[in-house]
Image (cartoon, rainbow, N blue to C red):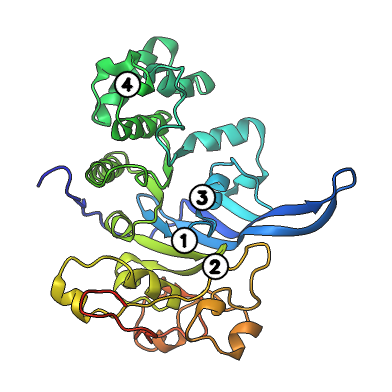
């Protein structure tokens, strides 16, 4: 199969103890008014109660609209942002309470691949210095005499010529730069990689190459991924489980088969209905969900269910009660896996579609 096509390495799914446990994670940015005397007038609720687990060797995909809080979650996981509340436990230890040497040890095991391969690499540093910088901070990983060889080995692992070690970022294409970013993330031999939209800035064919590379590296090094993306097709390809975020919260989470084949939350159903379908017959019979209205402000989210202002199922209860992330009541008696949770009072297997699509796939 050509490299530009997506290839999925089959990995057995095991029910093992989570390596990462996130509970009730919150990040609020304060809003102030005044120049001399600043008065607190509110907060932007970027993340407002996110919980999930990640197991060894597993990939958790996180999807959602821009501004839903995906990248903020990613930055908190690698301690680039301090959470307002909640816990992030790595192997049972809450890393939000660590500092100094203990935090540095954890940071070595949780690394990040950034979205933009053009701005995430220092243009004044060579590739060797960019990747090898990690060894300056963690010299125990690679003694000075071994660092050049280790950097060249990493370049070879990610599909680049080891002789490129003295080149600068501007001498590489976007896809090659992202491979350098992946090599930098692998330098300290981490257990978890947080990938914040790592392919969104790349051409489609290059996206497939990078995703195939990440899949291969996961099998080779037993990595666990948090994979954030907008492209639902890529998320389905690489993920074992998928979490759907809306306005700072996870509204549905489950295995990739359950989320894509049996979505229960209206927002998930709307997202999946917008995915392009190459088969003309399937496109002709597919029903398209068109959401009305704008995404509410995270500084003033709706009461109750945050999606209710755009939801065709919304009733009075939705404004009064916050729906819990749990197995939908309609599925509890039919053997639905407990891992498939939905935060909707009226979750159901069949979509209730407000707008039908025409033969060409448009509303």
* Residue drawn 45% across the image and 79% down it: 327
Q: Which residue is mark 4?
A: 171
Q: Give yes or no for contact between labels 4 and 3 (Cβ–Cβ under 8 Å).
A: no
* Residue drawn 44% across the image and 21% down it: 123
Camera-side mark, 4 or 3? 4
Marking on residue 295: 2
Whichever of callouts 4 and 3 sits on the residue coming sooner in the sequence is 3
Query: Can you give x and y, in whole percent of width and height, for residue 180 in the image?
Result: 35, 29
Q: Which residue is mark 1?
A: 65
- The crowding category of the residue bearing disc 3, from other C-alpha atoms within 10 Å (few below 14, some 14 to 19, many at least 20), is many
- Secondary structure, mark 1, is loop
Classify 188 as above or below 24: above
Camera-side mark, 2 or 3? 2
Q: Which residue is mark 3?
A: 71
Whichever of callouts 2 and 4 sits on the residue coming sooner in the sequence is 4
Q: Could one spot residue 265 in this view of the protein?
A: no
Classify 101 as above or below 214: above
Whichever of callouts 1 and 4 sits on the residue coming sooner in the sequence is 1
Whole-number angstrom distance, CA of label 4 to CA of label 3: 28 Å
């Amino acid at each position: 199969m050509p490299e530009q096509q997506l290839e999925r390495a089959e990995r057995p799914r095991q029910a093992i103890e989570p390596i990462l446990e996130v509970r009730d994670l919150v990040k609020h940015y304060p809003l102030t008014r005044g120049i001399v005397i600043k008065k607190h007038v509110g907060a932007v609720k970027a993340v407002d109660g996110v919980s999930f687990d990640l197991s060894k060797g597993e990939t958790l995909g996180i999807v959602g609209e821009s501004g839903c809080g995906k990248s903020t979650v990613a930055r908190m996981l690698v301690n680039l942002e301090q959470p307002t509340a909640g816990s992030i436990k790595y192997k049972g230890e809450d890393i939000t309470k660590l500092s100094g040497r203990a935090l540095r040890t954890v940071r070595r095991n949780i690394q990040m691949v950034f979205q933009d391969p053009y701005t995430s690499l220092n243009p004044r540093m060579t590739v060797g210095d960019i990747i090898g910088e990690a060894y300056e901070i963690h010299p125990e990983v690679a003694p000075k005499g071994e660092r050049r060889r280790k950097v060249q080995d990493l370049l070879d692992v990610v599909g680049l010529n080891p002789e490129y070690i003295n080149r600068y970022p501007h001498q590489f294409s976007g896809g090659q730069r992202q491979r350098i970013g992946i090599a930098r993330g692998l330098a300290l031999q981490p257990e978890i990689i947080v990938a914040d939209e790592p392919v969104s800035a790349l051409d489609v064919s290059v996206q497939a190459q990078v995703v195939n590379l990440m899949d291969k590296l996961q099998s080779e090094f037993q990595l666990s991924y948090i994979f954030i993306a907008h492209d639902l097709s890529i998320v389905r390809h690489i993920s074992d489980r998928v979490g759907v975020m809306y306005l700072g919260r996870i509204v549905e989470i489950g295995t990739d088969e359950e989320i894509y084949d049996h979505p229960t939350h209206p927002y998930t159903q709307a997202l999946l209905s917008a995915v392009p379908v190459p088969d003309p017959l399937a496109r002709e019979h597919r029903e398209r969900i068109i959401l009305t209205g704008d995404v509410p402000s995270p500084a003033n989210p709706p009461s109750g269910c945050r999606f209710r202002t755009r939801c065709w199922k919304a009733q009075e209860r939705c404004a009064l009660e916050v729906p819990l992330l749990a197995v939908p009541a309609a599925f509890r008696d039919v053997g639905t896996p407990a891992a498939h949770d939905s935060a909707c009072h009226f979750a159901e297997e069949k979509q209730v579609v407000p707008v039908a699509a025409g033969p060409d796939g448009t509303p």
